[in-house]
Image (cartoon, grey):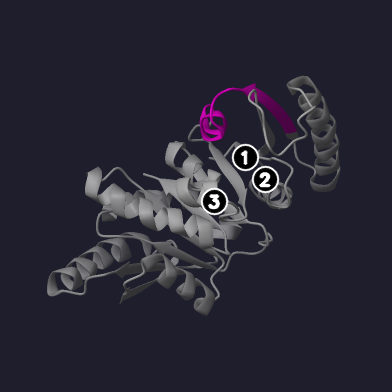
Amino acid sequence: MIRKIICPTDFSPAAINSIEYAAELAQELNAQLEILNVQSLFPVSAVPVEMNINERVSESTMTLEQTCNEINELFHIRSTYQIIATSESLAKSITADANENNIIVMGTNGVDDMIQFFFGTNTYHIIKKAKCHVLMVPENASYGSISKIVFAWSYETSSTAVILMLNDLISVFNPKIIFTPTVTFLHVSNDFSPVAKETFHILKKEIDSEIKKKIKIEFEQFVADDIPDSINRYMSKSKSDILMMAVQDRGLIGNIFHRSVTKKLTETAEYPILVMHA
């Protein structure tokens, strides 16, 4: 059960949009909303040089107090804020206290500078470190009813792990969210060999027999050289509302492959992505 939604903010347009999204989700799940602002103890290029850490914290406090008051009045939920002044990385600070009863809602505007291009978006680093589910919300995405969910999966993710995560999703989210959508299991790979086909059909049978009584499910499989781009095009063509992905420790080779796909999707996706940790 999700008891708290953690929503990091740097007061950018993407972060402001994610706070509104998180507030609506908190209202839907009857969960607490915590808005988190991390202030670096080192000089930060995004703020005026003459502002010291105390001035930055004071300014953030006033903004966050006003934001929480507005959210509480508008959404009738319990919202609080926390400011962390630290020398630790942003990803470590955000994920440090998050547990399995939390979900992190992270706004993103993709790759917005060269540093992020080479080292990955903050959202991607948070996904890597988090022990809880992470929901990535693009700057232009708005909260709405979820009718079509796509679950992107690979052969490295066992059917048992997928089933456990879906059962977790069903138990976590309000029934009116999860019991109405269609969930499409989407597998995109560079290989369409007889072995790959057989593996797909075996996993399909296992998942179908376990899940079909709870939610409506469909299966799609296709081959592509650029997997993230293919997923993006499928999401656009199918007009799906949200992409689900599984993060699972599968050893060095599997992790290298998964990192490249997850990283690119967090940089380019124009739809929400829910990353679930197995």
Q: Quadrant of residue 64?
A: top right
How far across and how far down the image is residue 101, in percent?
52, 35
Q: Are marks 2 and 1 in contact (CB under 8 Å)?
A: yes
Q: Residue furthest left?
A: 195
Amino acid, disc 3: Met
Residue ID for mark 3: 114
Residue ID for mark 2: 26
Q: Is residue 18 above or below residue 218?
A: above
Amino acid, disc 2: Ala
Judged from the image, the secondary structure of the residue bearing numbered disc 1 is strand
Q: Residues within 10 Å of mark 2 (few under 14, many from 20)?
A: many
Q: Residue at x 51, y 30 (%)?
A: 92
Amino acid, disc 1: Ile
Judged from the image, the secondary structure of the residue bearing numbered disc 3 is helix
Is residue 272 something that shows in the picture? yes
How far apart are the two marked residues, 2 and 1, measured between alpha carbons? 7 Å
Disc on res. 5: 1
Give the residues drawn in magenta, as a range: 80-97
How far apart are the two marked residues, 3 and 1, measured between alpha carbons? 30 Å
How far across and how far down the image is residue 244, in percent?
46, 58
Is residue 179 something that shows in the picture? no
Q: Is residue 266 above or below residue 93?
A: below
Q: Is residue 94 magenta?
A: yes
